[in-house]
Image (tube, grey):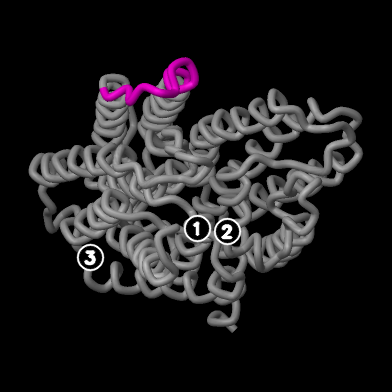
Amino acid sequence: MRRIGETIDATTAFIGAAVAGITLFLPVAFTAPTPMTDQRISGLMNSGARGAALAVIIAVTVSVLITTTTRPVNGWATALAGAAGQLINHFAGRHASSADVLTTENYIDSVCGAVLLGALGAVVLRRPLPAAAFAVGSVAFFVFDDLAELLDTDADPSAVLETPPRWLIGVTVALLLLSTLRNWSQLEEQKTPRMAIALPVTPILAGMVLAPVVLAGTEWLGRQFSKMPDEGHPVEIGITVAAILVAATAAAMLLPGRDGIAVYLAVSLITAVDAVGYAVRPGWVVCVLIALTALGVAVGARLPSTAIAILLVAGISVFALVTSTEANRVGSATISAVIALTAGYCCGTARPHYGPSGVLAIAVLYLPSVTSVLPNKVEDHVPVQDATPGWAALAIVIGCAVGLATLLRLRPRTKKLEKRQPESESVADI
């Protein structure tokens, strides 16, 4: 029975994390009652990035608060409330009186998704199987193009996509309700005494440092390209890259122990993947890529290596330098498989000891990156290969590699640290 219960919770963790990830990665949208102008579309996309930045702070805060409790049901119930609020928001959005309301709907969706992600991560990252499922579901947005084809959500080109679809949110609500009832009487075993004030705030501070800097830097860089689209803006790109690396370093150093590894890997991974781009592939491929992601998590958990993880991410950046996903089907399939394996391996390798640190690293994946705001070069209405995103991604990866080496040197692994329980390692209080 216990194994069945673990399987149920793992399934819930996977679906819930996938819904939260899609919610934060893509702006919510519905069939607009009035035509969507370029200004409204731009506002909706901007609200997506800003909503993701807000979601990072909310998710980590919720995770910290849930982690301080001794009843797992508190986390499951909070996640259920977040998913239920999101479902209500999607039903309400279908009856929006104006397309301008979509921006507000998107912020509400981001908040609900953040609550779902933070609460779910707080309870499942303490258990191996649900934690692995949560990690795989969290990075599922990397293959959202495939999911869009599979769900046929873009069948009507005149309608703006509803992401994620209501039926998928409904499934999440049902699974969360089941897991909440299953864990209703469970108590978390306490192997070490808790501190009188067990509210570690450094993960929250780390999120408040990293998310605003990434958002401000990418929006500023995007505005520079909008003002002078024909310029390369190398100085502006360099400034943005430097600001993101400084913010990532500050966030990583704020986290307890070696948990900052996850932040460095997340920042470098999303930048490299954005540099490659998201190619459209057949819908059935999503199952293969999710399986490869799960394989990567298993290998990373069994054979963790920070050096291998950052080298794999660097390889993705090099690919973005020399070619693109539009070059040929073989190249697209190969890099998609590498991205899936790398994302999973990074999750398995990082394994933060403190739950909110893991939630922060996952949430960082949904932030905009310096490469995501770089425009595509077009000649004669045909996209051409541009090495700028690849160089920017490689600069981020090299900076993160230096930060990782510094972090590992400043905080060597000790036997005392390895023997601690996750809760005892949460002494990040100020």
Q: Real-space Cα distance between discs 2 and 1?
A: 7 Å
- Left or right: 45, with 267 as reference point: right
* Quarter containing the C terminus: top left
Residue type at the position of mark 1: Ala
Q: Name the mark nearer the viewer: 2 or 1.
A: 1
Residue at the far front in the pictured view: 380
Residue type at the position of mark 2: Asp
> N-terminal of the two: label 2 or label 1?
2
Q: Position of residue 229 (x, y in %)?
A: 44, 23
Count neighbours of disc 3 (C-alpha within 10 A) and say few if under 14, some if 14 to 19, many if 20 or more.
some
Q: Name the mark nearer the viewer: 3 or 2.
A: 2
Count neighbours of disc 2 (C-alpha within 10 A) and say few if under 14, some if 14 to 19, many if 20 or more.
some
Q: Position of residue 22 (x, y in %)?
A: 60, 51
**Mark 2–mark 1 contact, CB under 8 Å?**
yes
> N-terminal of the two: label 3 or label 2?
2
Marking on residue 82: none
Residue 336 seen in this snapshot: yes
Residue type at the position of mark 3: Pro
Count neighbours of disc 1 (C-alpha within 10 A) and say few if under 14, some if 14 to 19, many if 20 or more.
some
Mark 2 falls on what kind of element?
Answer: helix
Q: Which residue is at a point 22% across and 38% down the rendered structure image?
A: 395
Give the camera-side residue of 330 and 92: 330
- Range of residues picked out in magenta: 223-234
Q: Position of residue 6 (x, y in %)?
A: 54, 74
Residue indicated by mark 1: 279
Residue 225 belongs to the span the image colors magenta: yes
Residue indicated by mark 2: 145
Residue 229 belongs to the span the image colors magenta: yes
Quadrant of residue 347 in the image? bottom left
- Left or right: 226, with 347 as reference point: right
Residue at the far top in the pictured view: 227
